[in-house]
Structures are given as structure tokens and as C-alpha cells.
Image (tube, rainbow, N blue to C red):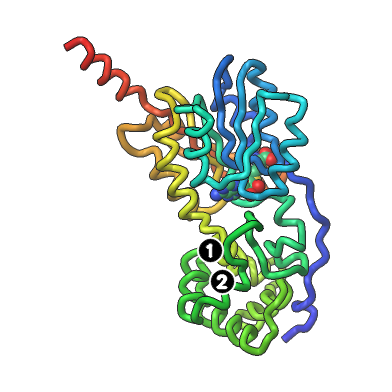
Amino acid sequence: MNLGELILPEVEPQMHLTVMRSEIVEGLSPQPGGVYVDCTAGGGGHSEALLEAGPLSRVVAFDRDVEAVARVRERLTPFGERATVVHADFEGIEAWLAQAGIAQVDGLVADLGISSFQLDDGERGMSFRFSGPLDMRMDQTRGPTAQELIASHSADELANIIYRLGEERRSRRVARCIKQAEEAGELCTTADLRRAVVRAVGPRRLGGVDPATKTFQALRIAVNDELGQLTSLVAMSARILKPGAVAAFISFHSLEDRIVKRAFVGDEWERLTKKPMLPTEAERAENPRSRTAKLRLGRRSAAEEADASEGDDD
Ligand SMILES: C[S@@+](CC[C@H](N)C(=O)[O-])C[C@H]1O[C@@H](n2cnc3c(N)ncnc32)[C@H](O)[C@@H]1O
């Protein structure tokens, strides 16, 4: 084995750039008096864009990451009471709105996955590019870390996670090597995890992606129950949006996009994007993170309202 492959590559952290900012503003088109929900506050870029575009509207932004909440609160301070930033995950949004007396909202955006702030902070343990603890939680106030998740699963269970959520063909070998490292007391950091994966699948091919990419993705998705959270969000969207209001979902991999695509099927929705919208060439060149982004828009259908008013005439 080439020992050089076991050393983490040096990478410069990147700034977080908001993906498809103008497409989100155009899609939601904030109106005076409207209330808009940003389900993934992150760095605050989409919230800020909506508040700027609709000077008489209001945004409630949610994030499960306490650091993101603090950052976005500061960024949105100039908008005063028009901006509210809340620490909650997708499953907490509906209850928060109900408690605040907001029955339904005028639009919703979810820019899924993690931010560059999270990815590039070694202490969060999300990336094999920086050495740090095996954490990977977006919400560091609760839930198992990646290390705890690995410890509480057998090699077979771990292999299933890595296969399903990382689409890693060699998941059995990878899981075996991870458990071996754990049993030897050699699995505490992201560098240890990457080392175990390289032991299983071999070093990076020239010009290829890092061999640990799929395993890190799978464990991060599992630690944060990202697909379960998204499924809840999609179901909730139909309940919290007013008839005629638009939901915008930006996804970054096929597992997410599959859930979003199915969301807009059925009478409750009018699909506004038959095919997903992609970032422009210019955005893809400026922001490499945007390259895999897919935006889908759906409008909450007004059918129920029409039905209700027909009923009123009787
Ligand atoms: C891609 S970033 C959003 C960036 C943001 N749109 C911007 O313009 O700066 C995704 C953010 O969503 C948050 N997030 C992801 N899943 C979440 C969930 N289930 N509940 C709440 N926040 C979530 C992450 O913590 C992260 O801060």
C-alpha cells in the first residue's frame, strides 16, 4: 500500500456560497405580508435573498445546527422583526409554527445537506479532508455521533448502511475493516476512518475521487437520519403551505432527489419543474459545490379551496 495515500490531503476551506439564490427568489416570489419558511438556514443566504426581494414580507428560518442559528441570527439582524431564526430540525417546524400562531405559510425553501461551514470545520468530523473527531452530527446537542453509530452496529448492519446510503459496492469489506479498526482501538478520528476504508478498497486512483467519499456520505446521512427527516419535511410541506404557495427543494444526490421528485406527485401539488432546474454554467464554475444541485419546485394546488367553495353553494 502506498503510505502517501493514508495522509490526508491538504485542502483550503471554501467560503459558503448560496446555491441557486436568484432561482429561489424567482420561484417563491415573496409578496407583501407573506410569511416564508427557510428550512435550512445554513449561512442565511436564501433567507437574506427573500427578505431583500420582498421588503414587506417575513422569513422564519430553521436549522438544527446551533452554530448556524447563531450565525444566521447575526446576519439577519438588519431585518429586525421580519426575520426569526429558530433551532429546530424539520420534524420540529410544524409544531413551532403552530405555537407561534402561524397556521400556514406562503412559501418554503429547503437547501438540503450540509454547509461548507460544517464540511470545512475539522472538529465537526464531516470530511475526510480534515482530521477531527468521528462526530458528523449537524445537531451537536443530541443524537449518536458517527463513532457511537459504528459501535452500536454489527459489521453486517454497517455494510447495509454503507451500501444503501453510500452506494459503495465493496460495503462488506469496508464495514469489516472499520469494525476491525474499532476493535483494535484504532478508530477515533476521521483520519482513522479514512485509513480503514483505504485498507478495504485500496488507494485513490489518479484523478479519481477519494476512496472514502461514499463511506463518509453514508455514515453522515445515517447519523443525521437525513432521508427520514426529508420524508417528514415533504409530507409536512403539503400541510403548512397555503393553497397556491410554492415549495422549493434543492437536493445534492440521487437518494434525496428521488424523495423530492415523488413529493410533487398527486392532487395536492402542481409540479412546476418537470425536469429539475440546474445551476447556470457561471454558477457551477464559481461554486463547485453547486455542481450536483437539482432544484424542484411545486405549487400547493388550490383544488381543496375550490372544492370547499363549491360545497358552500349547496
Ligand atoms: C446547504 S446548507 C443551507 C445553506 C443556506 N441555504 C444558505 O444559503 O446559506 C444546509 C443547512 O441545513 C441544515 N439542515 C440540514 N438538515 C436539516 C434538518 N433536518 N433540520 C434542520 N436543519 C437542517 C444544516 O445544518 C445546514 O446548516
Q: Quadrant of residue 175?
A: bottom right
Q: Quadrant of residue 197?
A: bottom right
Residue 186 sits above or below residue 234 on the image: below
Q: CA distance from mark 1 to mark 2?
A: 8 Å
Which one is in front, 145 or 177? 145
Question: Which residue does the numbered mark 1 point to in the structure image?
Answer: 222
Mark 1 in CB contact with mark 2 (< 8 angstroms): yes
Q: Quadrant of the N terminus?
A: bottom right
Q: Farthest residue in the bottom direction?
A: 184
Residue at image coords 77%, 36%: 74
Q: Say which amino acid is labelled 1.
A: Ala
Residue 123 sits above or below residue 172 on the image: above
Q: Farthest residue in the front direction?
A: 99
Q: Residues within 10 Å of mark 1 (few under 14, many from 20)?
A: many
Q: Quadrant of the C terminus?
A: top left
Q: Say which amino acid is labelled 2.
A: Leu
Q: Secondary structure at mark 2?
A: helix
Q: Residues within 10 Å of mark 2 (few under 14, many from 20)?
A: some
Which one is in front, 91 or 211? 91
Question: Which residue does the numbered mark 2 point to in the structure image?
Answer: 149
